[in-house]
Image: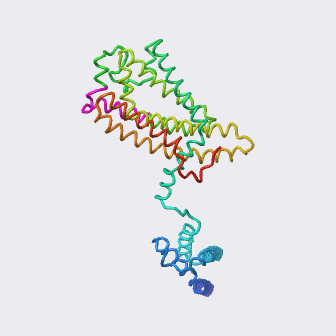
Amino acid sequence: MNAMSATATAAETQAIARAALRSDRFRLEREPDWQRLEAIVTKMEKDRLRRISDEDLLALPGLYRTVASSLSIARETSLDAATLAYLEALVQRAWFVVYGPRSSLWDWLRGFLGGGWSAAVRSIWFDVLIALAVMVAGTAVGWLLVAHDPEWYFALISPEMAGTRVPGATHEALRNSLFGQSDQSGMSVFAAGLFSNNAQVSILAFALGFALGVPTLLLLVQNTASLGALLWLYNGKGLLVDLIGWLAVHGTTELFAILLAGAAGLHVGRSIAFPGNRPVLRAASEAGRRAAVVMAGVVLMLVVAALLEGFARQLVDETFGRMVIGGFMLTAWCAYFFAFRGNASGVRRS
């Protein structure tokens, strides 16, 4: 038994020695290429392109393929873990340098705001029109429902959001909810509730678009019906214009964001339902890319709306000034989306 154990131990030792020798030989034969690639990648990661020679730049793709091949061989021959880890990390870094995005975040943002976003919105113009019609119809439905039966008001607007803004409230109570409330928490809660609700609606309107766009349309109707109910309430006390001014400061941006989110979701759903001559997956993929660009802008619009809601509306406490701010924002968004062309490269129209 001792002789057999000694023989086995000797065999294992020889196997380990052969593996180590093979690993060392493998590394020595290829290490110069690895080191050269690592030096090039490090310089490019540090934006030191001027320090890289033309020869190294030309050799970069070949070096990447060589190191990737070395990694494949190392995995097949079960070389030591340290070599494998080193090669895997190097190949990953080199891949981003060779095949990764060529533009920085600033370049992407400049292209996005410089025409990419507006072009994406124009490319789904038909869906924007449908979403707009549905939102207008939803507002009208909300108004008519509460006008017929005020009990609908509580079905459309939650008690937490409504607060004192309920049917039967006096003219003075409703007016006080619009003016001189910058230092009171009640109005801040109501404003925060509106923003939170609209942000959720925007995200859901887009996310539910895959179901052929039907849930998106229903969500737009539900959300704007509550707006119609609120308009009816204030109109009954002669405060409709004042309410519109109160909403306009942030609402022209916030509702525009909901409109675009709904249109983006509808665009995806419509592409799935009516792919045309394209396969469904391809149609959905193309629509999804356009809609994703639109939704990236929707997030930006919601941030702008939050800033307007948190500052501009509190600082401006009269209807005319609020109307001016809201009208300016609406004009600016329309001009950007439908008049400004900029650099729309990379966004395909449907």
Residue at the (28%, 18%) spot, across then down: 172
Q: Main secondary structure of the magenta part?
A: helix
- Looking at the image, the residue that sits furthest to the top is 148
Whole-percent x, y for residue 48 in the image = 46, 74
Residue 277 located left or right of residue 184: right
Q: Residue at x 49, y 61 (%)?
A: 104
Q: Position of residue 28 (x, y in %)?
A: 58, 86
Q: Quadrant of residue 14?
A: bottom right
Comparing 83 with 325, the one in front is: 325
Question: Is 60 positioned to the left or the right of 275 in the image?
Answer: left
Front residue of 87/317: it is 317
Task: Specify how the rendered protein is coloured.
Answer: rainbow
Total number of numbered discs in the rendering: 0
Looking at the rendering, the stretch of residues picked out in magenta corresponds to 178-197
- Is 322 magenta? The answer is no
Is 42 situated above or below 152?
below
Q: Is residue 324 above or below residue 293?
A: above
Locate the C terminus and report the quarter of the image it occupies: top right
